[in-house]
Amino acid sequence: MTEIRLHNTKTRRKEVFEPIDPSDVRIYLCGPTVYDRAHLGNARNVIMFDVLFRLLRHVYGPDHVTYVRNFTDVDDKINARAAESGREIGEITAETTQWYLDDMAELGTLEPTHMPRATQYIPQMIEMIEALIARGHAYAAEGHVLFAVESYAEYGALSGRSVDDMIAGARVEVAPYKRNPMDFVLWKPSAPDLPGWDSPWGRGRPGWHIECSAMSHALLGASFDIHGGGNDLMFPHHENEVAQSCCAHPEGSFARYWLHNEMLQVEGKKMSKSLGNFFTVRDLLDEGVPGEVIRFVFLSTHYGKPMDWTAKKAAEAEEELEKWALYTSNVEASKSIPSEVIDALCNDMNTHSALTALRKLAKSGEFAELKAGAEFLGFELQVDAGTQGAYDKILQSEENRPKIESLIERRATARKERNFEKADEIRAILTAAGVSLVDTADGGVTYKLEKDFDPAKLEGL
């Protein structure tokens, strides 16, 4: 069995991944709160888990991996958006959920096995809250139910913080009904104009953290393999999930491995509306940035490192993907995924190294392997009809083909005669004319005409 190693936030070290049940590998990713478009940073952990999903399916089999990513469709942000817009809550959540699905599909991501909505699991949340109260880990007060942080000795272990540090560093909601400032809401009362469900504590709605615990338990069980999200969720969201899940279901261990991705910057600065560098995924797509380019830029940086989105990186990614698409346009993908790509991903999903492996395959002319590896990483390598048409027209031109191939032959002869200076001179001339050469593994040469190909520069050579 292929060995996968992952950096486990829970233990703060890279570990060999050993699933609880190899025939049913189970992973969970915290999904969006659906009140607006997904911003660019929201896409990073989706792409990260998409690559993980693909890798696990490759190693354990497509039918043996269950991937859950939720939608939070009951939340105060949604309520506020409905109040300010005058629209129905259900209308907003349905629209923004579909926006999210459409945008993530544009980025080349596979759909998860399950995509539960929080409002579909209210009974399970109420049942979990009742279990926490019965076990002495939660208490009801003034229509609210709160988790008693002091009742769980391991609280803070995931994020590595003490309760005192968490109080000092967090904006803790002060409320007279709390026994401890760090106690967090599991259930809260709802006014008549807000969404609400009947419960033993009155009409109300769930707190944010209980949602993921209830949905993951219902779909994956008390113990599952991998949980993840952005490192901004580590505290308080993931810390609170661990506490309430382990206390409600002490027979389980909740998630065994935790993966957290670092945050996104834009042109070297934190993305924010005040700086004018805030983008949604749809903003970029509508500006003509292909989804594959966004995906390529994200995968160019390891998920555990901060990532900087720049226009330069996007332009370079688009150019590289276009080259790969043209190289492979008439090639059937290899039936096996290049081992260099799989090895890179098995090393804590090192997508940067996986892309480096694809570059080497492109350079050596191993285009069937390039296509297989690129498709495995989620790139379709489709050539734009206009670009392909122009490329084919120039390539098939009786006027230009002989000139290009004659120069390539002269370069090959010079190399055989070990006249490397002459060979380099010919290559430089071809490059100046917009002809890129690729030396293949069998000693041959293929070539590609760039967008700036200028046949006039071949005249008189």
Image (cartoon, rainbow, N blue to C red):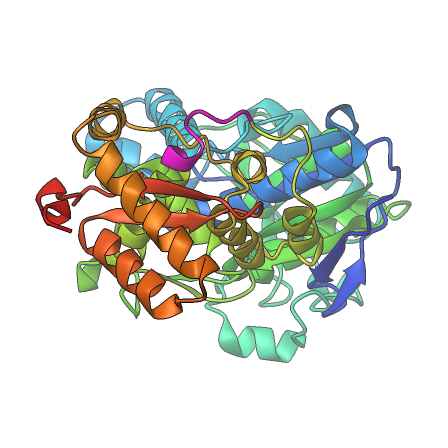
State left or right for residue 93 relative to residue 163: left
Indicate whether residue 50 is drawn in magenta: no
State left or right for residue 173 relative to residue 447: right
State left or right for residue 182 relative to residue 132: left
Q: Residue at x 72, y 47 (%)?
A: 226
Front residue (pair 424, 205)? 424
Look at the image and give the residue range highlighted in magenta.
Answer: 325-332
State left or right for residue 55 relative to residue 436: right
Q: Residue at x 66, y 33 (%)?
A: 67
Q: Residue at x 82, y 46 (%)?
A: 2
Q: How many marks?
A: 0
Instruction: Residue 219: name its quadrant.
Output: top right
Indicate whether residue 327 is drawn in magenta: yes
Q: Is residue 424 above or below residue 440?
A: below
Q: Position of residue 155 (x, y in %)?
A: 73, 65
Q: Position of residue 255 (x, y in %)?
A: 76, 49
Q: Which quadrant of the rendered structure holds the N terminus? A: top right
Front residue (pair 118, 265)? 265
Q: Is residue 29 above or below residue 16?
A: above
Q: Is residue 267 above or below residue 259?
A: below
Q: Position of residue 194 (x, y in %)?
A: 40, 31
Which residue, as the protein is rendered here, is positioned at the far front?
417
Give the prevailing secondary structure in the magenta stretch. loop
Instruction: Residue 102: name its quadrant.
Output: top left
Front residue (pair 356, 12)? 356
Front residue (pair 127, 15)? 15
Residue 217 seen in the figure:
no
Residue 396 seen in the figure:
yes
Which residue, as the protein is rendered here, is positioned at the far right?
251
Q: Position of residue 127 (x, y in %)?
A: 74, 32
